[in-house]
Image (cartoon, grey):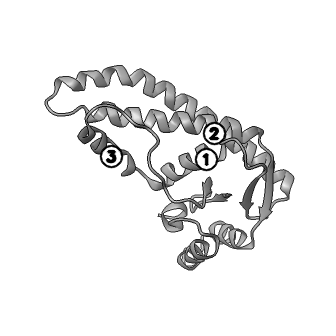
Amino acid sequence: MDFFFVRDHRRRFRFYSAEPLGPLPAHFSKTRAVWEKAKKKVTGLDPRTLLQEQAFAHGGRPGSEPLVIRHSGRRDEGAARARLLFFLQRMKTRHIAILATEAVVVPFTGLAALLPGPNVIFYALAILMVIQWQALRGLSRLAVKRHEFVADPLLAEWEDAVERRDEARYPALLERLGRELGLPTPRKLLWR
């Protein structure tokens, strides 16, 4: 499985795999209607975030050494490796902070149980916590795995357009990224 480490239109680094968003990994024994409502709320979130979380979780799975990571090639492999490791550490810190915040908020969602209807808030937060936890575990494993960096001229062309803020080239480049590299919905991932 190939992974992509590339900047988006705001010049922020993103980490993705070529897989489309898969099924959510949590199963609860409560009523199916509540579960489906919560799942719908979570999958309605920004695909940029959900696909990145999925890439973190999938990249950290055992096996499949070394991980192939496609990057723009605008920097040498050592600089790309350092940038990736710094990015992974920053994401790991962010996930720990988010999980701590969610752990503090979860007890208060129990008060929503007093309201009529299903407690969708609790289930949506629980699903988000499971996703965050799996991504955190994947981030820890990703940092210690061997990485094989592959420079891709199409990603270099995209980052060049981003640096120059040449938005007229974005649609054509994003279409080529989707077609040639198999990146799912590149417009939603890297632009708007």
Mark 2 and mark 1: Cα distance apart in space? 7 Å
What crowding class fits label 1: few (fewer than 14 Cα within 10 Å), some (14-19), or many (20 or more)?
many
x then y, percent, for residue 85: 74, 43
Res 176 visible = yes
Instruction: State the residue lying farthest toward the left.
Output: 116
What crowding class fits label 3: few (fewer than 14 Cα within 10 Å), some (14-19), or many (20 or more)?
some
Residue 122 or residue 34, whichever sits in front: 34
**In the rendered view, does 66 fall on the left or right side of 159?**
right
Residue 138, numbered circle: 2
x then y, percent, for residue 124: 35, 37
The residue drawn where x is 47% and y is 41% is 25
Residue 58, numbered circle: 1
Q: Which residue is identified by label 3?
A: 41
How many labels sit on residues? 3
Question: Which residue type does callout 1 highlight?
Answer: His
Q: Quadrant of residue 105?
A: top left
The residue drawn where x is 73% and y is 48% is 84
Precedes in sequence: disc 1 or disc 3 = 3
Question: Which residue type does callout 3 highlight?
Answer: Lys
Mark 1 and mark 3: Cα distance apart in space? 22 Å
Res 12 visible = no
Precedes in sequence: disc 2 or disc 1 = 1
Question: Which residue type does callout 2 highlight?
Answer: Gly
- Where disc 2 sits, the SS reads helix
Residues under numbered marks 2 and 1 in contact, where contact means CB atoms less than 8 Å apart: yes
